[in-house]
Amino acid sequence: MSNPQSLLPTLPALVPAGHGAVVCEADACRRVGVEEARKIFRSGEVLVAHAAFVAGRLKTPPAKPLYDVLELFAFVRPGVPCVPSALGIARVLGIPAVDSAEDAAHSLCQSALTLLSEIADWNEAERAKLRPLVQTLATAGWRWAGPVLQHVGESERASSPLAGFDAWRSLREWEDEAPPGKPSSHPVAVEEARARLTQLVGSGGETRPEQRAYVDAASYAFTPREHAGTPRIALVEAGTGIGKTLGYLAPASLWAEKNGPGLWISTYTRNLQRQIVQEIARLYPDPAEREDKAVVRKGRENYLCLLNFEEAVKRTALAPGQRSVALALVARWIAATSDGDMSGAGFPAFLAATFALREITDRRGECIYAACPHYRVCFIERVVRRARNAPIVVANHALVIAQAAQDWLSVDETTDTQPERRTRYVFDEGHHLFDAADSGFAALISGAEMAELRRWVRGPEGRARSRMRGIEERLKDLVVDNENARRTLEEAVAAASVLAGEGWM
């Protein structure tokens, strides 16, 4: 097997540019037309960054797997945010002077060698842990498997089709904590909120009269109610650019510090969530403290479901290929992520070109909770528990609506108590709340969705070799001693037979 130091310089690097591409060979770069770029690309003996994007630009699929440096980056540095391009990889790796397409093509070889050298610096424990996964990738035809194996070494034992994919085994279990007490009702004075705004803006910030007026108005919502059933509500509107986020964060953060968990800030989009978290960083500059004090809650469909991931891996094991490579890179990310958020910056979203990411999320409400073998390490359950004890929770309108409906259904009629206390809401972009309510309480189901639901309930039908399990297989151990539960499960499986099956048009 060739040494990567001698292998990589012999490979041309290709970056799309204009109506063709830039090809760099032996430190010499040249512009080529579309036809020549396609020929080089289809050969497979070429370095690229984001093969699916390059194939789209050149309007030709690769004839064989390529040396995709973006895949190598996702393997070596899982969970590290990176713009999916040669330029983005070079910037993260600290490779200087990458300004043009020629520079980007020239940097690809250097990026690959840098990443391979990082593997060479891993300790023996890390190498031993990854050997089974790399050998599985070699079987799947991953082009980087050979150079990587030169550094991590080969295992003496034969690798199983699923070796190395069980990233959930290394995850730390979440711990249940005592539920927080009922939030207090200490008021937030306008003068306090103004002082907090000054702290958030900073000494070099601009003081705006409109922003101060916004803080004064928003503070009203954080004063104690005078009568039961009459919460304090403040509808505050302001123009673009006055700093509304800091305007409501000033009194809201004070209320959270004084009264304990119970404050939720709701937005309409994930981008707004990220913006709010960036502003909260002014209040909690230390990342560890910020992670403890402010938790981001998103819908279940944004988080990786370990059980669905396991099912996807089992289906893929029967036909290894590029899909196996994509799932292996997801496994690397699982071991590195702290929250399992697939909409976050560190998830290798470029893998969506290889398989549908919805396969490994909970999009149908199919979670079996404590019956799941991965329940104690579940990312969703972990973030739910963190949010219960966090002073500030940053969520979105759709989740707040769904949570409110769930709370209403779960009220204990004897004590009129709810499982989780949320006593203050801030709705940013509140005019979108009605659209979110329409979406949250509506239902849309297509033939494809019915087929997916049927497959989830009944499992594989007519596929003897499939590793996928239906809900009956998943729950049978849980309901074996409960006659009513077994009967209900049987009725659900039978009822699902009327749904559209696979291939239904």
Image: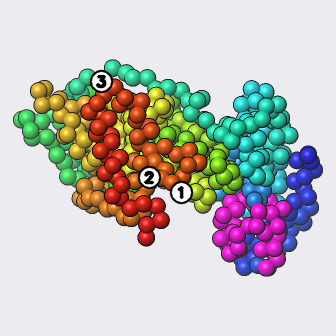
Q: Position of residue 201 (x, y in %)?
A: 41, 44
At x 30%, y 28%, the residue is: 482
Neighbourhood count class around disc 1 (C-alpha, 10 Å): few under 14, some 14–19, many 20 upward? few
Tell me the quarter of the image containing the C terminus.
bottom left
In three-dimensional space, the C-alpha distance between marks 1 and 2, rounded to whole angstroms, equals 16 Å
Q: Secondary structure at mark 2?
A: helix
On residue 55, which mark appears? none
At x 52%, y 45%, the residue is: 468
In three-dimensional space, the C-alpha distance between marks 1 and 3, rounded to whole angstroms, equals 39 Å
Residue 57: within the magenta? yes
Range shown magenta: 35-64
Q: Which residue is mark 3?
A: 180
Mark 3 and 2 residues: CB-CB less than 8 Å, in contact? no
- What is the quadrant of residue 382 in the picture? top left
Q: Earlier in the sequence, mark 1 or mark 2?
A: 1
| Amino acid under disc 2 | Arg
Residue 401, visible in the rendered structure: yes
Q: Is residue 459 left or right of residue 431?
A: right
Residue 374: within the magenta? no
Q: Earlier in the sequence, mark 1 or mark 3?
A: 3
User: Where 20 sits versus 131, above or below?
Assistant: below
Neighbourhood count class around disc 2 (C-alpha, 10 Å): few under 14, some 14–19, many 20 upward? many
| Amino acid under disc 3 | Pro
Q: Is residue 290 left or right of residue 138?
A: left
Q: Earlier in the sequence, mark 3 or mark 2?
A: 3
Q: Which residue is mark 1?
A: 356
On residue 455, which mark appears? 2
Neighbourhood count class around disc 3 (C-alpha, 10 Å): few under 14, some 14–19, many 20 upward? some
User: Where 157 sits versus 490, above or below?
Assistant: above
